[in-house]
Every structure is written in structure tokens, then in C-alpha cells.
Image (spheres, helix red, strand yellow):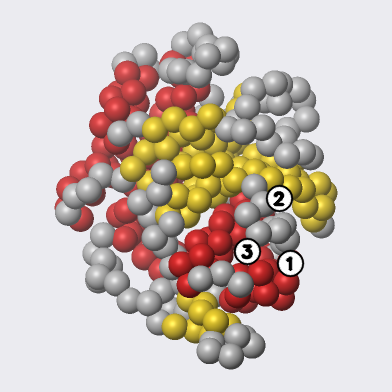
Amino acid sequence: MPYPPTILCAPLPQAAPGQLDIWRRAFEAGLEPWLDARQMEHVRRFGRAPTLVQSAHLQPDAKAFRPDVSGSKMSGQNISGPDAAGRRPVEAALSRLMARAQLITAVGLPTAPGWPQTAEAGALPIITMDNRTRPLLAGWQSGFSHSGAAAFCVLAPATDETRTAIAVDAEAITSPPPDASAFAANELTALRSLSQTGIDRDALRRWTIKEALLKAAGLGLGMPPALVPTGGSGQRAGLWRGPLGLFGWRVAPCPGHWLCVAQTGKIPQPPRILWQTPCELLRNLARLRQHV
């Protein structure tokens, strides 16, 4: 890719569930011209199913790992938080809408220097998905992630006929770490040498690498995460030869989050990271709607 990946980030609005639903409806209406039926159904499905919000984390609030006193194995510990069952479904749907809004507004209203300019917003292509549920937008490579606190979209222009898969994963550093079963024996050994805070943070760093690579490969959690290596302690970039070929990964600095980009064939260039508020994102979406 001649352009480095760009990661667009937007925090979720801090509001009561009813107000969040107003945001959700506004983004859904604004995106309607650019989401195909499968994409829209995908977003709405998350709004109906609160159990899906945490599925990608191997149920961390039910069983997060901690080393036992002997250091010989990892054992589970229940992690409980405030009851947010009423807001989680709408947050999940809103986050997915915001990620797609970031993609379509970045293509229609590009801010990165040197990016191709779309001639007319009304002529923008529709966001579809492939048979592995990865987003498709003609002329672009893209991927989404959701930390529970913010929505993320990675994108870069596609420059040849061979589509390069690209993906991003984001985890808030305050999130509970995933289950020990997500890690290989050598990864668990490396984690035990750290303090408890270090264990939690490095486990999340390694998890973002695993999930970004599995997303880029289109495997999701259909492949055990423990089979995806994450390199040495503190490693920030590397290569993985998986069952579907060679994929590169790079961890990027991001306030309050671990962030990892993965792509087909090589280690990604250091990404550009751009933040915008939900209000800015919705205004940009409204600007595009004026041309439809």
C-alpha cells in the first residue's frame, strides 16, 4: 500500500440509554444510503442481542485469568461491574454504526493529505461485506473494532486488483483480560514474570494482536486464539504465517487503549490515528447526506 493505514477513532457519547438510542437512530438514518441490507441487519442484530457484546472477549467478566499463588497455572476470578444491561445493546449497535460512519465520511470527506478525493458524495459506493463478514467498500481496504468505550475504523486506499485484507483491534486498558485459554504456554510463562498490573496490560496487548490477525485472516474466533503467536515481551510488530497465508501486525500507541493493525503479506506501516467527537462525526455524515 502506498499510503499508511489510517485509524479513525470516536468515543461513544456519555449518556443515558434513552439518549444513546436517539444517537443510534440518528446514525442509522444518516447511514441508510450507504449500508446494504446485510450491513444494516448486522448492526441491528447487535442492538437486539446483549450477549453478543462481550462474546469476542471469551466472556472476560465471567472468567478473567490470574496466576495462582504457586505460579503453576492460571485460575479464574469473577469480575463484576455496574449493571449496564440496559445500555449495552444500544451501545453495541451505536458503536458499529459510528465505525461505519467513520469509514464513509473519510472516503467522502477525506482529511488525510494525499488521499484520493471522491468526486461526488452521492456517488459513493455502498458498504457491503464478504463471506467472512469483513467490510467491503470499492477502492478501499477497511476494518472495524469496538472497545466498549470507542468505535474504531482502519482504512487505506486499495491500489491494485489484488485485495489486501486489513483489520484493527482495540481494547481499553481498563478492560478485564481474557481467559487464560486464549494464550499459549510460552505466553503465560512470559506473563507470570510481571506484576499483576503488568500481567493484565500485557495480556490485553497480546489479545489485540491475536484478534487483529484473526480478523484480517477472516477466521474470527473460529480458530483458537492460543494458536496465534504474539512475539516476545513488549514486541510491537511481527509476522504470522497462518493457515490462510502470511499476515503482518503492528501495535500502535493510542490514549487509553491497546491498538493493533494487521494486514495481508507484510508488517503494516505505522498508522495515522485521528480522533473525532460523536458530534463531529454526525455533522460530517449530515454533510454527505446533503448531496444524496
Task: Label 2, secondary structure: give it.
Answer: helix
Q: Amino acid at mark 2?
A: Ala
Mark on residue 217?
A: 2
Vertical placement of residue 197 versus 291, above or below: below
Residue at (53% x, 47% y) in the render: 259
Which quadrant of the view contains residue 88?
A: bottom left
- Using residue 138 as the reference point, say whether residue 108 is left or right of it: left
Q: Determine the CA span between mark 1 and mark 2.
A: 13 Å
Checking the image for residue 221, the label placed there is 3
What residue lies at 69% left-to-right and 45% top-to-bottom? 237
Residue 44 % position (x, y): 39, 51
Which residue is at a point 38% across and 55% down the rendered structure image? 148
How crowded is the residue under tag 1: few (<14 C-alpha within 10 Å), some, or many (20+)? few
Q: Earlier in the sequence, mark 1 or mark 3?
A: 3
The answer to whether residue 139 is left or right of residue 280 is right
Amino acid on which disc 3 is placed: Leu
**What residue sits right under mark 1 in the picture?**
227
